[in-house]
Amino acid sequence: MSIPINNLNRSATESLNSKTASSRLKTSSDGDDVSQSSEITENERDTVSLSAESAQVRGLQNRLGDIPEVDAEKVARIKKEIANGNYPVDSKAIADNLLQLEKALGK
């Protein structure tokens, strides 16, 4: 897949094209070659080619963007259980997991 990137920074591109054309004019000894090289410079197009892997990554990013970060139904269900006093809290398991996290971060 190619994406044209013309006119991103027009003044920089024009400056570069004029420098390229003038250097070709100086180095060319034949009049026909000069007009040809300046035409090529003016008609050249910059493109970027993306690999299949990058296109796949872009597709995955788009799909991930459609998935909500938080499961709202699960949050509402847990809030309701906590409010009713029916949500079991295992403080030992929470403490163990916090210690494992601290150890992992300390490495």
Image: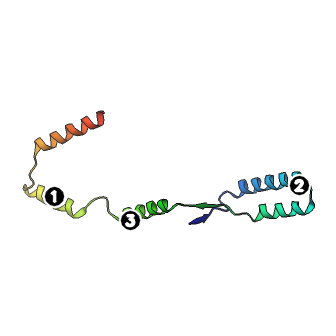
Q: CA distance from mark 1 to mark 3?
A: 27 Å
Q: Nearer the viewer, residue 17 or 51?
A: 51
Give the residue type that dot 2 points to: Ser
For the C terminus, give its image quadrant: top left
Q: Residue at x 87, y 63 (%)?
A: 35
Q: CA distance from mark 3 to mark 2?
A: 53 Å
Tell me the SS state at disc 2: loop
Q: CA distance from mark 1 to mark 2?
A: 77 Å
Rendered location of residue 84, percent (x, y): 8, 58
For the N terminus, give its image quadrant: bottom right
Question: Could you say which quadrant of the image residue 66 lies in?
Answer: bottom left
Rendered location of residue 8, percent (x, y): 65, 59
Q: Is residue 98 left or right of residue 34?
A: left
Residue 87 versus residue 63 in the image, above or below: above
Q: What residue did someone put label 1 on? A: 78
Q: Residue at x 75, y 65 (%)?
A: 43
Q: Residues within 10 Å of mark 2 (few under 14, many from 20)?
A: some
Q: Residues within 10 Å of mark 1 (few under 14, many from 20)?
A: some
Q: Is residue 5 left or right of residue 40?
A: left
User: Which callout, 1 or 2, points to the residue nearer the camera?
Assistant: 2
Q: Nearer the viewer, residue 94 or 17?
A: 17
Which circle's residue, 1 or 3, is located before the other in the chain? Answer: 3
Q: Residue at x 87, y 55 (%)?
A: 25
Tell me the SS state at disc 1: helix
Q: What residue did someone put label 2 on? A: 28
Q: What residue did someone put label 3 on? A: 63
